[in-house]
Amino acid sequence: MEPILDFLGSIPWWGWILIFLLLVALRDIFFQRAHTISHNFPVVGHLRYWLESIGPEMRQYFVANNREELPFNRIERGWIYASAKKENNYEGFGTERDIYAHQHIFVKNAMMAYQMPQGHPNIDNPYFLPCAKVIGGYNKRRKPFRPASIINISAMSFGSLSAAAVTAMNQGVEKCDAYHNTGEGGLSPYHKQGGDVIFHFGTGYFGVRSRDGNFSMDKLKILVDENPAIKGVEIKLSQGAKPGKGGVLPGAKITHEIAEIRGVEVGKDVLSPSTHKAFSSIPELLELIESIAEETGLPVGIKGAIGKLDQWEELADLMKKSGKGPDFITIDGGEGGTGAAPPSFADHVSLPWTYGFSSVYKVFADRGLTERIVFIGSGKLGFPAKAAMAFAMGVDCINVAREAMMSIGCIQAQVCHTNRCPAGVATQSKWLQKGIDVPLKSDRLAQYFKTFRKEFLEITHAAGYEHPCQFTMNDIQLNVDHDYLSSDLEAIYRYKKMQVPFESMQNLYDCVHLGGKPVLKKTS
Protein backbone atom coordinates (compact mmCIF):
# COMPACT_ATOMS: atom_id res chain seq x y z
CA MET A 1 0.00 0.00 0.00
CA GLU A 2 2.82 2.39 0.91
CA PRO A 3 4.55 2.09 -2.51
CA ILE A 4 1.21 2.82 -4.19
CA LEU A 5 0.65 5.91 -2.06
CA ASP A 6 4.22 7.06 -2.77
CA PHE A 7 3.62 6.60 -6.51
CA LEU A 8 0.33 8.52 -6.41
CA GLY A 9 1.99 11.27 -4.41
CA SER A 10 4.75 11.60 -6.98
CA ILE A 11 2.30 12.36 -9.82
CA PRO A 12 2.40 16.10 -10.65
CA TRP A 13 -0.81 18.15 -10.82
CA TRP A 14 -0.80 18.16 -14.61
CA GLY A 15 -0.52 14.39 -14.53
CA TRP A 16 -3.85 14.16 -12.68
CA ILE A 17 -5.43 16.35 -15.37
CA LEU A 18 -4.14 13.99 -18.08
CA ILE A 19 -5.48 10.97 -16.18
CA PHE A 20 -8.89 12.62 -15.83
CA LEU A 21 -8.99 13.46 -19.55
CA LEU A 22 -7.95 9.88 -20.38
CA LEU A 23 -10.80 8.50 -18.28
CA VAL A 24 -13.25 10.86 -20.00
CA ALA A 25 -11.97 9.73 -23.41
CA LEU A 26 -12.33 6.06 -22.47
CA ARG A 27 -15.85 6.70 -21.26
CA ASP A 28 -16.73 8.61 -24.44
CA ILE A 29 -15.40 5.92 -26.78
CA PHE A 30 -16.32 2.66 -25.06
CA PHE A 31 -19.10 3.27 -22.52
CA GLN A 32 -21.53 5.81 -23.95
CA ARG A 33 -23.37 5.78 -27.27
CA ALA A 34 -26.03 8.45 -26.64
CA HIS A 35 -23.99 11.39 -27.95
CA THR A 36 -22.40 10.97 -31.37
CA ILE A 37 -20.23 14.10 -31.15
CA SER A 38 -18.54 13.13 -27.88
CA HIS A 39 -18.07 9.55 -29.14
CA ASN A 40 -16.46 10.61 -32.41
CA PHE A 41 -14.50 13.45 -30.84
CA PRO A 42 -13.73 12.35 -27.27
CA VAL A 43 -13.08 15.06 -24.68
CA VAL A 44 -13.20 18.03 -27.11
CA GLY A 45 -16.74 17.07 -28.14
CA HIS A 46 -17.90 18.13 -24.69
CA LEU A 47 -17.00 21.73 -25.53
CA ARG A 48 -19.80 21.76 -28.09
CA TYR A 49 -22.43 20.90 -25.46
CA TRP A 50 -20.97 23.37 -22.98
CA LEU A 51 -20.95 26.21 -25.52
CA GLU A 52 -24.52 25.33 -26.52
CA SER A 53 -25.64 25.45 -22.87
CA ILE A 54 -24.33 29.01 -22.41
CA GLY A 55 -25.45 30.18 -25.85
CA PRO A 56 -28.46 32.19 -24.58
CA GLU A 57 -26.29 34.09 -22.10
CA MET A 58 -23.58 34.76 -24.72
CA ARG A 59 -26.12 36.12 -27.19
CA GLN A 60 -27.92 38.10 -24.48
CA TYR A 61 -24.86 39.96 -23.25
CA PHE A 62 -22.40 39.99 -26.16
CA VAL A 63 -24.14 39.37 -29.48
CA ALA A 64 -27.70 40.78 -29.60
CA ASN A 65 -28.11 44.54 -29.75
CA ASN A 66 -30.12 46.54 -27.22
CA ARG A 67 -33.44 46.24 -29.09
CA GLU A 68 -33.03 42.80 -30.63
CA GLU A 69 -33.75 40.21 -27.96
CA LEU A 70 -37.00 38.41 -27.24
CA PRO A 71 -39.16 38.11 -25.25
CA PHE A 72 -37.78 41.25 -23.54
CA ASN A 73 -34.89 43.19 -25.00
CA ARG A 74 -32.05 44.74 -23.05
CA ILE A 75 -33.56 48.24 -23.01
CA GLU A 76 -36.87 46.92 -21.64
CA ARG A 77 -35.14 44.87 -18.97
CA GLY A 78 -32.88 47.78 -18.10
CA TRP A 79 -35.88 50.10 -17.66
CA ILE A 80 -37.51 47.65 -15.25
CA TYR A 81 -34.29 47.10 -13.27
CA ALA A 82 -33.59 50.84 -12.99
CA SER A 83 -37.21 51.64 -12.10
CA ALA A 84 -37.24 48.93 -9.41
CA LYS A 85 -34.01 50.25 -7.90
CA LYS A 86 -35.13 53.89 -8.20
CA GLU A 87 -32.13 54.61 -10.40
CA ASN A 88 -31.93 56.83 -13.48
CA ASN A 89 -34.13 55.13 -16.09
CA TYR A 90 -33.76 57.90 -18.67
CA GLU A 91 -31.94 57.60 -21.98
CA GLY A 92 -29.91 60.32 -23.66
CA PHE A 93 -29.17 61.50 -27.18
CA GLY A 94 -32.52 60.37 -28.58
CA THR A 95 -34.31 57.05 -28.93
CA GLU A 96 -32.57 53.91 -30.15
CA ARG A 97 -35.83 52.55 -31.51
CA ASP A 98 -36.66 52.45 -35.19
CA ILE A 99 -39.73 54.66 -34.89
CA TYR A 100 -40.83 53.65 -38.38
CA ALA A 101 -40.86 49.94 -37.49
CA HIS A 102 -44.03 47.87 -37.66
CA GLN A 103 -46.23 48.16 -34.54
CA HIS A 104 -44.31 51.11 -33.09
CA ILE A 105 -46.60 53.00 -30.69
CA PHE A 106 -47.17 56.76 -30.79
CA VAL A 107 -49.13 58.45 -28.00
CA LYS A 108 -50.68 61.67 -29.28
CA ASN A 109 -49.94 64.46 -26.85
CA ALA A 110 -52.33 67.37 -26.38
CA MET A 111 -51.39 70.92 -27.31
CA MET A 112 -51.78 71.77 -23.62
CA ALA A 113 -51.33 69.02 -21.04
CA TYR A 114 -53.76 68.29 -18.20
CA GLN A 115 -53.05 70.55 -15.23
CA MET A 116 -53.86 69.21 -11.78
CA PRO A 117 -56.01 71.59 -9.71
CA GLN A 118 -55.09 72.55 -6.16
CA GLY A 119 -55.69 69.69 -3.70
CA HIS A 120 -55.58 67.00 -6.41
CA PRO A 121 -54.68 63.55 -4.96
CA ASN A 122 -51.72 63.14 -7.33
CA ILE A 123 -50.02 66.32 -6.12
CA ASP A 124 -49.22 64.70 -2.77
CA ASN A 125 -49.07 61.15 -4.09
CA PRO A 126 -47.83 60.94 -7.71
CA TYR A 127 -48.17 57.13 -7.58
CA PHE A 128 -51.90 57.01 -6.82
CA LEU A 129 -53.60 55.41 -9.84
CA PRO A 130 -56.55 53.11 -9.06
CA CYS A 131 -58.91 51.30 -11.40
CA ALA A 132 -61.74 53.52 -12.68
CA LYS A 133 -64.28 50.71 -12.26
CA VAL A 134 -65.44 48.73 -9.23
CA ILE A 135 -65.16 44.98 -9.75
CA GLY A 136 -68.52 43.45 -8.88
CA GLY A 137 -70.29 46.80 -8.74
CA TYR A 138 -72.72 46.19 -11.59
CA ASN A 139 -73.73 42.73 -10.36
CA LYS A 140 -74.10 44.05 -6.81
CA ARG A 141 -71.80 41.49 -5.21
CA ARG A 142 -71.69 41.68 -1.41
CA LYS A 143 -67.96 42.45 -1.41
CA PRO A 144 -67.21 44.67 -4.43
CA PHE A 145 -63.60 45.67 -4.95
CA ARG A 146 -61.89 48.60 -6.64
CA PRO A 147 -58.20 47.76 -7.27
CA ALA A 148 -56.08 50.54 -5.81
CA SER A 149 -53.53 50.04 -8.59
CA ILE A 150 -54.03 49.71 -12.35
CA ILE A 151 -50.92 47.46 -12.49
CA ASN A 152 -50.97 44.19 -10.54
CA ILE A 153 -49.30 40.78 -10.42
CA SER A 154 -50.59 38.19 -12.86
CA ALA A 155 -51.28 34.52 -12.11
CA MET A 156 -48.05 32.78 -11.05
CA SER A 157 -48.19 29.79 -8.72
CA PHE A 158 -46.12 28.86 -5.73
CA GLY A 159 -44.39 25.79 -7.10
CA SER A 160 -43.62 27.47 -10.38
CA LEU A 161 -42.10 30.33 -8.39
CA SER A 162 -40.07 29.91 -5.24
CA ALA A 163 -41.34 30.62 -1.75
CA ALA A 164 -38.93 33.55 -1.47
CA ALA A 165 -40.13 35.04 -4.77
CA VAL A 166 -43.82 34.75 -3.87
CA THR A 167 -43.17 36.24 -0.43
CA ALA A 168 -41.27 39.18 -1.92
CA MET A 169 -44.04 39.80 -4.44
CA ASN A 170 -46.84 39.73 -1.88
CA GLN A 171 -44.98 41.99 0.52
CA GLY A 172 -44.26 44.24 -2.45
CA VAL A 173 -47.88 44.63 -3.51
CA GLU A 174 -48.80 45.41 0.09
CA LYS A 175 -46.30 48.28 -0.02
CA CYS A 176 -47.71 49.74 -3.24
CA ASP A 177 -51.44 48.88 -2.82
CA ALA A 178 -51.62 46.46 -5.76
CA TYR A 179 -53.10 42.96 -5.78
CA HIS A 180 -51.45 39.57 -6.21
CA ASN A 181 -53.03 36.79 -8.30
CA THR A 182 -52.21 33.40 -6.75
CA GLY A 183 -51.99 31.40 -9.96
CA GLU A 184 -53.56 27.97 -10.06
CA GLY A 185 -51.27 26.42 -7.44
CA GLY A 186 -53.50 27.44 -4.55
CA LEU A 187 -53.21 29.99 -1.75
CA SER A 188 -49.86 29.40 -0.02
CA PRO A 189 -48.57 30.93 3.22
CA TYR A 190 -46.34 33.07 1.02
CA HIS A 191 -49.41 34.77 -0.48
CA LYS A 192 -50.49 35.85 3.00
CA GLN A 193 -47.99 38.63 3.64
CA GLY A 194 -50.46 41.51 3.70
CA GLY A 195 -51.26 42.21 0.05
CA ASP A 196 -54.67 42.01 -1.61
CA VAL A 197 -55.16 38.66 -3.34
CA ILE A 198 -57.15 37.34 -6.29
CA PHE A 199 -57.62 33.60 -5.84
CA HIS A 200 -57.21 31.80 -9.15
CA PHE A 201 -58.00 28.19 -10.01
CA GLY A 202 -57.78 26.12 -13.16
CA THR A 203 -58.67 22.62 -14.23
CA GLY A 204 -56.69 21.05 -11.37
CA TYR A 205 -58.73 23.00 -8.74
CA PHE A 206 -55.66 23.16 -6.49
CA GLY A 207 -56.54 24.50 -3.07
CA VAL A 208 -60.25 23.90 -3.64
CA ARG A 209 -59.95 20.32 -4.86
CA SER A 210 -62.18 17.45 -3.76
CA ARG A 211 -60.84 13.92 -3.34
CA ASP A 212 -62.00 12.95 -6.83
CA GLY A 213 -60.18 15.93 -8.37
CA ASN A 214 -63.30 18.05 -8.87
CA PHE A 215 -64.13 21.56 -7.66
CA SER A 216 -65.20 21.87 -4.01
CA MET A 217 -67.41 24.84 -3.15
CA ASP A 218 -67.12 24.01 0.55
CA LYS A 219 -63.33 24.31 0.45
CA LEU A 220 -63.56 27.60 -1.41
CA LYS A 221 -65.98 29.03 1.16
CA ILE A 222 -63.67 28.04 4.01
CA LEU A 223 -60.68 29.50 2.20
CA VAL A 224 -62.42 32.84 1.60
CA ASP A 225 -63.79 33.03 5.15
CA GLU A 226 -60.36 32.38 6.65
CA ASN A 227 -58.52 34.80 4.37
CA PRO A 228 -60.11 38.27 4.12
CA ALA A 229 -57.23 39.38 1.87
CA ILE A 230 -58.93 37.47 -0.97
CA LYS A 231 -60.79 40.13 -2.94
CA GLY A 232 -61.97 38.11 -5.92
CA VAL A 233 -62.00 34.69 -7.58
CA GLU A 234 -60.70 34.01 -11.09
CA ILE A 235 -61.54 30.89 -13.12
CA LYS A 236 -58.84 30.03 -15.64
CA LEU A 237 -60.25 28.80 -18.94
CA SER A 238 -56.88 28.94 -20.68
CA GLN A 239 -53.55 30.75 -20.54
CA GLY A 240 -51.32 32.33 -23.13
CA ALA A 241 -48.47 29.85 -22.80
CA LYS A 242 -50.51 26.73 -23.61
CA PRO A 243 -54.24 27.30 -24.17
CA GLY A 244 -56.26 24.11 -24.27
CA LYS A 245 -53.43 21.97 -22.89
CA GLY A 246 -53.31 20.41 -19.45
CA GLY A 247 -50.20 19.44 -17.56
CA VAL A 248 -48.62 16.92 -15.20
CA LEU A 249 -47.05 17.81 -11.88
CA PRO A 250 -44.57 14.94 -11.29
CA GLY A 251 -44.85 13.17 -7.95
CA ALA A 252 -41.15 13.74 -7.30
CA LYS A 253 -41.80 17.50 -7.16
CA ILE A 254 -44.69 17.29 -4.71
CA THR A 255 -43.35 18.08 -1.27
CA HIS A 256 -45.48 17.85 1.88
CA GLU A 257 -45.92 21.62 1.77
CA ILE A 258 -47.04 21.70 -1.87
CA ALA A 259 -49.32 18.69 -1.30
CA GLU A 260 -51.05 20.43 1.61
CA ILE A 261 -51.50 23.70 -0.30
CA ARG A 262 -52.76 22.05 -3.49
CA GLY A 263 -54.85 19.36 -1.82
CA VAL A 264 -53.03 16.45 -3.49
CA GLU A 265 -51.07 13.40 -2.35
CA VAL A 266 -47.33 13.45 -1.67
CA GLY A 267 -45.27 11.61 -4.27
CA LYS A 268 -48.15 10.96 -6.66
CA ASP A 269 -48.34 12.48 -10.15
CA VAL A 270 -51.15 15.03 -10.49
CA LEU A 271 -52.88 15.57 -13.80
CA SER A 272 -54.28 18.97 -14.78
CA PRO A 273 -56.69 18.08 -17.56
CA SER A 274 -57.16 20.28 -20.59
CA THR A 275 -60.82 20.96 -19.73
CA HIS A 276 -62.86 21.63 -16.60
CA LYS A 277 -64.93 19.05 -14.75
CA ALA A 278 -67.09 21.65 -12.96
CA PHE A 279 -68.70 22.81 -16.23
CA SER A 280 -68.78 21.80 -19.86
CA SER A 281 -70.82 24.56 -21.51
CA ILE A 282 -71.26 28.33 -21.40
CA PRO A 283 -74.56 28.13 -19.42
CA GLU A 284 -72.87 25.86 -16.88
CA LEU A 285 -69.91 28.27 -16.62
CA LEU A 286 -72.31 31.15 -15.99
CA GLU A 287 -74.09 29.08 -13.34
CA LEU A 288 -70.77 28.33 -11.59
CA ILE A 289 -69.80 32.01 -11.63
CA GLU A 290 -73.09 33.02 -10.01
CA SER A 291 -72.87 30.18 -7.45
CA ILE A 292 -69.37 31.20 -6.36
CA ALA A 293 -70.39 34.87 -6.14
CA GLU A 294 -73.47 33.99 -4.08
CA GLU A 295 -71.64 31.64 -1.71
CA THR A 296 -68.58 33.84 -1.13
CA GLY A 297 -69.92 37.34 -1.80
CA LEU A 298 -66.83 38.03 -3.92
CA PRO A 299 -66.57 39.25 -7.50
CA VAL A 300 -65.85 36.39 -9.90
CA GLY A 301 -64.04 36.58 -13.22
CA ILE A 302 -62.64 34.41 -15.98
CA LYS A 303 -59.27 34.30 -17.72
CA GLY A 304 -58.62 33.12 -21.24
CA ALA A 305 -56.31 33.25 -24.21
CA ILE A 306 -58.24 34.06 -27.37
CA GLY A 307 -58.76 32.02 -30.50
CA LYS A 308 -62.23 31.25 -31.83
CA LEU A 309 -64.95 33.71 -30.85
CA ASP A 310 -68.13 31.61 -31.08
CA GLN A 311 -68.23 30.70 -27.37
CA TRP A 312 -67.32 34.25 -26.35
CA GLU A 313 -70.27 35.43 -28.43
CA GLU A 314 -72.47 32.83 -26.75
CA LEU A 315 -71.32 34.08 -23.34
CA ALA A 316 -72.03 37.71 -24.27
CA ASP A 317 -75.49 36.84 -25.61
CA LEU A 318 -76.32 34.91 -22.45
CA MET A 319 -75.08 37.77 -20.26
CA LYS A 320 -77.25 40.24 -22.14
CA LYS A 321 -80.27 37.97 -21.85
CA SER A 322 -79.84 36.99 -18.18
CA GLY A 323 -78.34 40.17 -16.72
CA LYS A 324 -75.69 38.00 -15.05
CA GLY A 325 -72.12 37.11 -15.81
CA PRO A 326 -68.47 37.51 -14.83
CA ASP A 327 -67.46 40.68 -13.03
CA PHE A 328 -64.08 40.79 -14.75
CA ILE A 329 -62.44 39.19 -17.76
CA THR A 330 -58.69 38.73 -18.03
CA ILE A 331 -57.42 38.43 -21.59
CA ASP A 332 -54.06 36.68 -21.87
CA GLY A 333 -51.80 37.09 -24.88
CA GLY A 334 -50.70 34.11 -26.93
CA GLU A 335 -47.11 35.35 -26.65
CA GLY A 336 -46.72 32.94 -23.75
CA GLY A 337 -45.60 33.76 -20.24
CA THR A 338 -44.03 32.15 -17.21
CA GLY A 339 -45.78 28.82 -17.84
CA ALA A 340 -43.59 26.23 -19.56
CA ALA A 341 -45.05 25.06 -22.87
CA PRO A 342 -44.07 23.20 -26.03
CA PRO A 343 -42.88 25.62 -28.75
CA SER A 344 -45.75 24.47 -30.97
CA PHE A 345 -48.16 25.94 -28.42
CA ALA A 346 -46.17 29.01 -27.32
CA ASP A 347 -45.42 29.98 -30.93
CA HIS A 348 -48.69 29.23 -32.69
CA VAL A 349 -51.75 28.53 -30.52
CA SER A 350 -54.00 31.51 -29.61
CA LEU A 351 -53.77 35.12 -30.75
CA PRO A 352 -51.26 37.74 -29.58
CA TRP A 353 -52.69 40.10 -26.99
CA THR A 354 -53.61 43.00 -29.27
CA TYR A 355 -55.46 40.78 -31.73
CA GLY A 356 -57.13 38.69 -29.03
CA PHE A 357 -58.24 41.57 -26.84
CA SER A 358 -59.58 43.67 -29.70
CA SER A 359 -61.62 40.69 -30.96
CA VAL A 360 -63.19 39.94 -27.57
CA TYR A 361 -63.77 43.57 -26.55
CA LYS A 362 -65.67 44.14 -29.77
CA VAL A 363 -67.95 41.18 -28.96
CA PHE A 364 -69.00 42.78 -25.65
CA ALA A 365 -69.04 46.36 -26.99
CA ASP A 366 -71.44 45.41 -29.79
CA ARG A 367 -73.87 44.14 -27.14
CA GLY A 368 -73.49 47.13 -24.79
CA LEU A 369 -71.90 45.09 -22.00
CA THR A 370 -68.55 46.81 -21.45
CA GLU A 371 -69.72 48.94 -18.51
CA ARG A 372 -70.56 45.76 -16.58
CA ILE A 373 -67.11 44.22 -16.96
CA VAL A 374 -63.66 45.15 -15.71
CA PHE A 375 -61.27 44.18 -18.52
CA ILE A 376 -57.80 43.10 -17.46
CA GLY A 377 -54.96 42.79 -19.98
CA SER A 378 -52.06 40.39 -19.56
CA GLY A 379 -49.29 40.04 -22.13
CA LYS A 380 -46.08 42.12 -21.98
CA LEU A 381 -47.98 45.29 -21.03
CA GLY A 382 -45.74 46.36 -18.13
CA PHE A 383 -44.41 49.47 -19.88
CA PRO A 384 -46.18 52.86 -19.86
CA ALA A 385 -46.53 53.26 -23.65
CA LYS A 386 -47.90 49.72 -24.06
CA ALA A 387 -50.26 50.34 -21.17
CA ALA A 388 -51.50 53.53 -22.84
CA MET A 389 -52.28 51.51 -25.96
CA ALA A 390 -54.07 48.86 -23.88
CA PHE A 391 -56.21 51.44 -22.05
CA ALA A 392 -57.07 53.11 -25.35
CA MET A 393 -58.31 49.71 -26.57
CA GLY A 394 -60.58 49.24 -23.54
CA VAL A 395 -58.51 47.76 -20.72
CA ASP A 396 -59.25 48.82 -17.12
CA CYS A 397 -56.27 47.16 -15.40
CA ILE A 398 -53.16 45.28 -16.47
CA ASN A 399 -51.50 42.25 -14.92
CA VAL A 400 -47.78 41.63 -15.25
CA ALA A 401 -45.87 38.41 -14.67
CA ARG A 402 -42.40 38.37 -16.21
CA GLU A 403 -41.98 42.11 -15.59
CA ALA A 404 -42.71 41.51 -11.89
CA MET A 405 -40.17 38.67 -11.87
CA MET A 406 -37.52 40.95 -13.37
CA SER A 407 -38.20 43.61 -10.74
CA ILE A 408 -37.15 41.11 -8.05
CA GLY A 409 -34.06 39.87 -9.88
CA CYS A 410 -35.02 37.64 -12.86
CA ILE A 411 -32.31 37.88 -15.57
CA GLN A 412 -34.31 36.23 -18.40
CA ALA A 413 -32.17 33.09 -18.30
CA GLN A 414 -35.17 31.25 -19.82
CA VAL A 415 -34.70 28.14 -17.67
CA CYS A 416 -37.92 28.54 -15.65
CA HIS A 417 -39.00 25.00 -16.57
CA THR A 418 -35.76 23.32 -15.39
CA ASN A 419 -35.80 24.21 -11.65
CA ARG A 420 -32.33 25.77 -12.15
CA CYS A 421 -33.27 29.48 -12.18
CA PRO A 422 -29.99 31.25 -11.30
CA ALA A 423 -31.84 34.17 -9.72
CA GLY A 424 -33.79 31.93 -7.30
CA VAL A 425 -37.14 33.17 -8.67
CA ALA A 426 -38.47 30.15 -10.58
CA THR A 427 -36.98 27.26 -8.64
CA GLN A 428 -37.60 25.17 -5.56
CA SER A 429 -33.87 24.90 -4.81
CA LYS A 430 -33.33 26.10 -1.24
CA TRP A 431 -29.78 27.18 -2.08
CA LEU A 432 -30.76 29.30 -5.09
CA GLN A 433 -33.67 30.87 -3.19
CA LYS A 434 -31.29 32.12 -0.51
CA GLY A 435 -30.01 34.65 -3.03
CA ILE A 436 -33.32 36.54 -2.74
CA ASP A 437 -33.25 39.22 -0.05
CA VAL A 438 -37.01 39.33 0.56
CA PRO A 439 -37.31 42.79 2.19
CA LEU A 440 -35.07 44.35 -0.47
CA LYS A 441 -36.80 42.63 -3.39
CA SER A 442 -40.26 43.51 -2.08
CA ASP A 443 -39.19 47.16 -2.00
CA ARG A 444 -37.99 46.85 -5.58
CA LEU A 445 -41.25 45.37 -6.84
CA ALA A 446 -43.18 48.12 -5.08
CA GLN A 447 -40.88 50.76 -6.56
CA TYR A 448 -41.27 49.32 -10.08
CA PHE A 449 -45.06 49.53 -9.75
CA LYS A 450 -44.86 53.06 -8.35
CA THR A 451 -42.49 54.24 -11.08
CA PHE A 452 -44.70 52.65 -13.71
CA ARG A 453 -47.81 54.39 -12.37
CA LYS A 454 -46.03 57.74 -12.08
CA GLU A 455 -44.71 57.63 -15.66
CA PHE A 456 -48.04 56.34 -16.97
CA LEU A 457 -49.81 59.25 -15.26
CA GLU A 458 -47.32 61.68 -16.80
CA ILE A 459 -48.07 60.25 -20.27
CA THR A 460 -51.80 60.48 -19.48
CA HIS A 461 -51.48 64.12 -18.47
CA ALA A 462 -49.42 64.83 -21.60
CA ALA A 463 -52.34 63.50 -23.63
CA GLY A 464 -54.66 65.93 -21.82
CA TYR A 465 -56.38 63.47 -19.49
CA GLU A 466 -56.63 62.98 -15.72
CA HIS A 467 -56.95 59.17 -15.76
CA PRO A 468 -55.88 56.55 -18.34
CA CYS A 469 -59.47 55.32 -18.63
CA GLN A 470 -60.11 58.48 -20.65
CA PHE A 471 -57.81 57.42 -23.49
CA THR A 472 -59.64 56.86 -26.76
CA MET A 473 -58.56 54.79 -29.73
CA ASN A 474 -57.78 57.97 -31.64
CA ASP A 475 -55.15 58.92 -29.05
CA ILE A 476 -52.80 56.10 -30.06
CA GLN A 477 -51.27 55.61 -33.47
CA LEU A 478 -49.41 52.53 -34.74
CA ASN A 479 -47.14 51.93 -37.68
CA VAL A 480 -48.90 49.34 -39.82
CA ASP A 481 -46.96 48.70 -43.04
CA HIS A 482 -45.22 50.51 -45.87
CA ASP A 483 -48.41 51.06 -47.87
CA TYR A 484 -50.72 51.99 -45.00
CA LEU A 485 -47.91 53.67 -43.02
CA SER A 486 -49.56 54.49 -39.68
CA SER A 487 -53.08 54.85 -38.35
CA ASP A 488 -54.99 55.11 -35.09
CA LEU A 489 -56.31 52.09 -33.23
CA GLU A 490 -59.93 52.63 -34.22
CA ALA A 491 -59.09 52.41 -37.92
CA ILE A 492 -56.83 49.40 -37.43
CA TYR A 493 -59.05 47.23 -35.22
CA ARG A 494 -62.39 48.55 -36.52
CA TYR A 495 -64.26 49.15 -33.30
CA LYS A 496 -64.74 52.05 -30.93
CA LYS A 497 -63.84 51.90 -27.26
CA MET A 498 -66.85 52.57 -25.04
CA GLN A 499 -66.52 55.52 -22.69
CA VAL A 500 -65.65 54.58 -19.11
CA PRO A 501 -67.67 56.52 -16.49
CA PHE A 502 -65.20 58.75 -14.66
CA GLU A 503 -65.68 61.88 -12.56
CA SER A 504 -62.38 62.55 -10.83
CA MET A 505 -59.39 60.93 -9.18
CA GLN A 506 -60.65 62.24 -5.85
CA ASN A 507 -63.86 60.23 -6.25
CA LEU A 508 -61.77 57.10 -6.77
CA TYR A 509 -59.75 57.82 -3.66
CA ASP A 510 -62.90 58.35 -1.60
CA CYS A 511 -64.47 55.06 -2.81
CA VAL A 512 -65.40 52.76 0.10
CA HIS A 513 -64.49 49.71 -2.02
CA LEU A 514 -60.92 50.84 -2.76
CA GLY A 515 -58.38 48.09 -2.15
CA GLY A 516 -54.94 48.38 -0.59
CA LYS A 517 -54.19 51.02 1.99
CA PRO A 518 -53.44 54.14 -0.07
CA VAL A 519 -52.34 57.14 1.96
CA LEU A 520 -52.16 60.59 0.44
CA LYS A 521 -48.70 61.64 1.39
CA LYS A 522 -45.50 62.39 -0.39
CA THR A 523 -43.53 59.20 -0.78
CA SER A 524 -39.82 59.14 -1.43
Image (cartoon, rainbow, N blue to C red):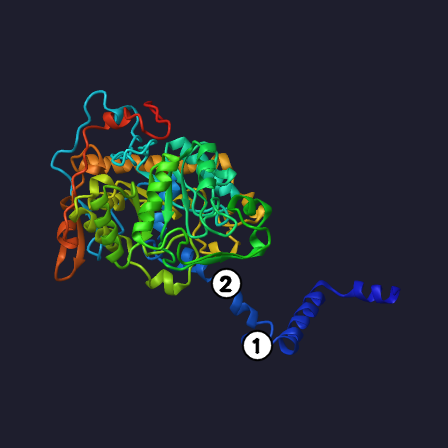
Residue 5 image offset from top left, x and y in percent: 83, 63
Q: Is residue 85 visible?
A: no
**Residue at x 37%, y 59% (from the top left corner):** 244
**Residue at x 18%, y 47% (from the top left corner):** 365
In depth, the one of 511 and 302 nearer the eye is: 302
In depth, the one of 487 and 512 nearer the eye is: 512
The label shown at residue 491 is none
Question: What kind of element bears circle 1?
Answer: loop
The label shown at residue 41 is 1
Residue 237 image offset from top left, x and y in percent: 36, 52
In depth, the one of 223 and 243 nearer the eye is: 223
Q: Quadrant of the N terminus?
A: bottom right
Judge left or right: residue 375 versus residue 445: left
Give the label, 1 or 2, closer to the camera.
2
In depth, the one of 363 and 434 nearer the eye is: 363
Crowdedness near tag 1: few (<14), some (14–19) or many (≥20) residues, C-alpha within 10 Å: few
User: Badge 2 is on which residue?
Assistant: 53
Residue 90 image offset from top left, x and y in percent: 31, 41
Residue 369, compared with residue 47, is above or below; it is above
Judge left or right: residue 108 versus residue 519: left
Q: Is residue 518 visible?
A: yes
- N-term mark: 1 or 2: 1
Give the amino acid type for the residue marked by disc 2 in the picture: Ser
Question: What kind of element bears circle 2?
Answer: helix
Residue 488 image offset from top left, x and y in percent: 14, 50
**Residue at x 29%, y 34% (from the top left corner):** 454
Residue 516, compared with residue 497, is above or below; it is above
Crowdedness near tag 2: few (<14), some (14–19) or many (≥20) residues, C-alpha within 10 Å: few
**Residue at x 47%, y 38% (from the top left corner):** 191
Judge left or right: residue 81 versus residue 359: right
